[in-house]
Image (spheres, rainbow, N blue to C red):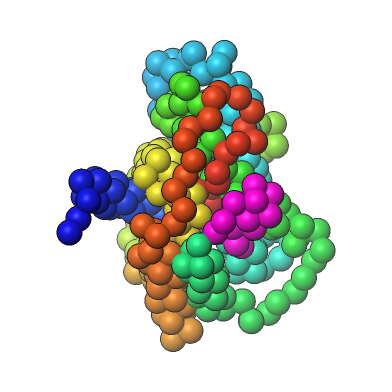
C-alpha cells in the first residue's frame, strides 16, 4: 500500500531525472558544435568566450528580473560565475593544452566522486551505497569511453589544471544546491543568468576576444560531410548547449540529491561521443561502446534507489553557503 506522499515523491524524482538527462544531453552536444568552429580558425578559448558571452546576452532579461539577487546573494552569484562558468571552462582548456583530451576529461569527471567525498568527509553526512557504487561504475565507464590507456602522458601542471576543473565542477553542484536553501531561496534562473554574466566578464580578461577572427562566422564550416553556415553551430552551442543545459542542470538539483544528479551528468560523455560518431565521423570502438553502457548503468544504479536515501534536512535560515548539500559544470 502506497503512502499519500509516495506518488508525489516518484513524480519529483521523475522530473529531476528528466531534467538532469536533458541537461547532460545538451552539454554533450557542445563539443560537436564547437569543433567545426575551431577547425575553421577560432581558438578553443575564443569559442568558450563566444559560448559564455552569447549565453550571458540571452540571459540579460532574467538577470534584470532577478536583480534583487545582487543585493541578497552576492557571494552565491560570484561563486557560481567564477566556478560553474569561468573556472571549469578555463581550467579544462588549460589542461588539454598540456595533456591528452581524454585524460583531462577523465580527471575532470572525477567530480562526482569528489562530490561524494565532500558530502561524507566535509559535511559529515551519510552517502548511500547506491550513489557510491553508481559513481564508481560511471567513472569506470568513462575510462573506456575516453580510452585513457592510450598515450597517457602526465604533465604535472596539466593534471593540476584538470583536477582544478573537477573541483570547479563540484563547486557548481554545491552552489546550485546552496541557492535552494534559506527562507528566500535564490531562483536558479537568476543564479544562472548572473553566473553567466560574471563568467563572461572573467573569460573576457583571460581570452582577449578582440584578437579573434570573428569574420569566419559569416562563412561556412564542415559538419557531417556538408558545408553549413558557421552561425548555426555557434547558435546551437550558445542556446542549447549552454543556456538550456545550464538551466535544466540547475533545476534538476531541486528534484534530485546532488550526488545522484552528479552521477547522471556523466551521460554527457556518452552523448558527446555518439554525436562525434554520427556528425564528425569519429567512430566508436568496442571499449567505448562498453564504457558508454557502464556510464548509463552507473547513473541509473544511483537513481534506482534514490527513495532509500537519507532525506535532506529542512531548509536552514539564510546564511553562508557552508550549509549546502552538494548536485551543467561541465566542459561540454
Q: As rendered, which of 2 and 140 lies closer to the eye?
A: 2
Relative to 223, is 193 above or below? above
On the image, which quarter does residue 249 sit in?
top left
**Viewer can see residue 229:** no
Tell me what residue is drawn at x 25 percent, y 46 percent. Answer: 5
Q: Is residue 266 above or below residue 75?
A: below
Residue 301: x and y in percent read 40, 69
What stretch of residues is rendered in magenta? 110-127
As rendered, which of 66 and 203 lies closer to the eye? 66
Residue sitting nearer the eye, 272 or 183: 183
Q: Is residue 124 at all visible to an observer of this figure?
A: yes
Farthest-out residue, left = 1
Q: Position of residue 173 (x, y in %)?
A: 54, 45
* Residue at the (40%, 73%) spot, across then down: 297
Q: Does the magenta segment cover residue 117?
A: yes
Q: How many marks?
A: 0
Whether residue 215 is in magenta: the answer is no
Front one among 153 and 131: 131
Q: Is residue 317 above or below residue 81?
A: above
Magenta span: chief secondary structure? helix
As drawn, the residue found furthest toward the bottom would be 286
Quarter-of-image position of residue 276: bottom left
Q: Quadrant of the N terminus?
A: bottom left
Q: Residue furthest right?
A: 156
The image position of residue 113, as x and y in percent, is 60, 62
Identify which residue is drawn at 53% across, 51% down. Answer: 330
Instruction: Answer left or right for 267 relative to 105.
Output: left
Percent x, y of residue 317 = 54, 25
Indicate the quadrant where residue 111 lies: bottom right
Taking 259 as reference, is 103 above or below it? below
Amino acid at each position: 500500500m502506497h503512502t499519500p506522499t509516495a506518488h508525489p515523491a516518484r513524480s519529483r524524482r521523475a522530473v529531476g531525472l528528466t531534467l538532469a538527462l536533458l541537461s547532460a544531453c545538451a552539454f554533450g552536444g557542445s563539443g560537436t558544435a564547437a569543433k567545426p568552429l575551431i577547425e575553421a580558425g577560432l581558438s578553443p578559448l575564443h569559442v568558450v568566450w563566444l559560448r559564455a558571452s552569447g549565453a550571458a546576452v540571452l540571459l540579460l532579461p532574467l538577470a534584470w528580473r532577478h536583480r534583487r539577487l545582487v543585493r541578497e546573494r552576492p557571494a552565491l552569484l560570484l561563486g557560481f560565475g567564477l566556478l560553474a562558468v569561468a573556472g571549469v571552462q578555463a581550467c579544462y582548456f588549460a589542461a588539454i593544452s598540456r595533456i591528452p583530451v581524454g585524460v583531462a576529461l577523465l580527471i575532470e569527471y572525477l567530480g562526482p566522486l569528489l562530490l561524494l567525498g565532500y558530502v561524507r568527509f566535509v559535511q559529515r553526512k551519510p552517502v548511500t551505497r547506491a550513489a557510491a557504487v553508481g559513481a564508481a561504475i560511471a567513472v569506470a565507464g568513462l575510462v573506456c569511453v575516453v580510452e585513457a590507456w592510450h598515450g597517457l602522458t602526465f604533465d604535472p601542471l596539466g593534471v593540476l589544471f584538470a583536477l582544478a576543473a573537477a573541483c570547479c565542477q563540484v563547486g557548481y553542484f554545491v552552489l546550485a544546491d546552496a541557492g535552494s536553501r534559506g527562507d528566500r531561496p535564490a531562483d536558479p534562473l537568476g543564479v544562472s543568468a548572473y553566473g553567466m554574466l560574471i563568467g563572461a566578464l572573467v573569460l573576457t580578461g583571460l581570452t582577449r576576444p578582440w584578437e579573434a577572427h570573428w569574420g569566419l562566422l559569416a562563412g561556412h564550416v564542415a559538419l557531417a560531410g556538408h558545408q553549413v553556415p558557421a552561425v548555426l553551430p555557434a547558435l546551437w552551442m550558445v542556446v542549447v548547449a549552454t543556456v538550456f543545459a545550464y538551466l535544466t542542470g540547475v533545476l534538476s538539483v531541486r528534484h534530485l540529491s546532488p550526488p545522484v544528479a552528479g552521477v547522471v551528468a556523466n551521460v554527457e560523455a556518452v552523448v558527446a561521443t555518439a554525436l562525434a560518431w554520427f556528425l564528425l565521423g569519429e567512430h566508436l570502438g568496442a571499449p567505448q561502446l562498453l564504457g558508454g553502457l557502464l556510464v548509463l548503468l552507473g547513473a541509473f544504479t544511483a537513481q534506482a534507489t534514490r527513495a532509500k536515501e537519507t532525506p535532506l534536512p529542512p531548509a536552514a535560515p539564510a546564511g553562508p553557503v557552508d550549509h549546502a548539500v552538494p548536485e551543467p559544470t561541465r566542459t561540454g
